[in-house]
Amino acid sequence: MLLRKLADAIRVHSVVDSGFVVTELCRDIADLTGVGEETEAQLAAAVSDAEHWLVKQSRMRGQLFSELDEAIVASDLVQVRTLRKHLRAVAYRGQTDAEKQTMATAETLLEAHARQQQEAAAARRAELQDERDSQAAGRARKLLGRRKGGRMSPEVMRKLVDEVVNDASQAGARIDAQQQGQIIAWKRRADSSRVRPKAARRTAASLRIAVRAAG
């Protein structure tokens, strides 16, 4: 069973932090007692192979950390992200102080970049919103200016009021107090124009009923 676990552990990328697992299995095998000579020879050969594998892995690990250091210095974020992910899988445990510092520096660099991206995206959203609000203010002022051109039908005025209210709502503080007062006055007129036709229709209906009753 231990030989199978050891063989599985030394397969490339077979397990997370395989170097640590292989080291622990070699210790377990060394502690075995009461095995036959043939089994003991097999175990000794397997441990010897595993130890050679560990030496190669140690060199590879050192090379990966060296490459990560270089990527950090160069601010190569793609390489930093790739190497950090790989090293977290194959060298999560048993890191030296220098290796821990390298990993921490990589984390700091990636987190700073993520914050910069978030801040840039937020700034762009704010800029776009500012543009939309400015455009809405411009449309509202233009609509307010149309009212000065002369009288208009109630239907046209109601439509105009709906548009200017929507634009003014989006424009916010870009609409000054005078313009806000003008919009309020417009809305009152538009609301009253909605009531008057209903009252006129009721009056006309009443007159028709009275005429029929008199006849």
Image (tube, rainbow, N blue to C red):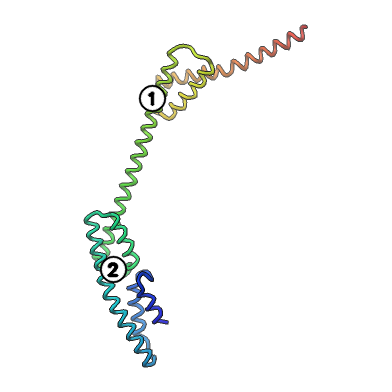
Place of residue 67 in the rendered image (x, y in percent of width and height, measured from the top left): 24, 62
In terms of sequence position, does the residue under pointer 1 or pointer 2 come before the other? 2
What amino acid is found at the position of numbered circle 1 in the picture? Answer: Gly
- Seen from the viewer's position, the closer of residues 93 and 62 is 62
Distance from Cα at disc 1 to Cα at disc 2: 62 Å
For the image, the number of numbered tags is: 2
Quadrant of residue 5 within the rendered picture = bottom left
Viewport quadrant of the C terminus: top right
Foreground: disc 1 or disc 2: 1
The image shows residue 1, relative to residue 151, as above or below, that is below
Q: Is residue 99 left or right of residue 185?
A: left
Report the residue marked by disc 1.
138
Give the residue drawn at x 59%, y 15%.
196
Please identify the quadrant where the N terminus is shown: bottom left
Q: Nearer the viewer, residue 188 or 17?
A: 17
Few, some or many C-alpha atoms within 10 Å of disc 2 (few <14, some 14-19, many ≥20)? few
**Residue 127's spot in the image, x, y percent?**
34, 36
* Identity of the residue drawn at 29% across and 79% down: 51
Q: Secondary structure at mark 1?
A: helix
Name the residue furthest top. 215
Label placed on residue 102: none
Circle 2: residue type: Gln
Crowdedness near tag 1: few (<14), some (14–19) or many (≥20) residues, C-alpha within 10 Å: some
Residue denoted by label 2: 95
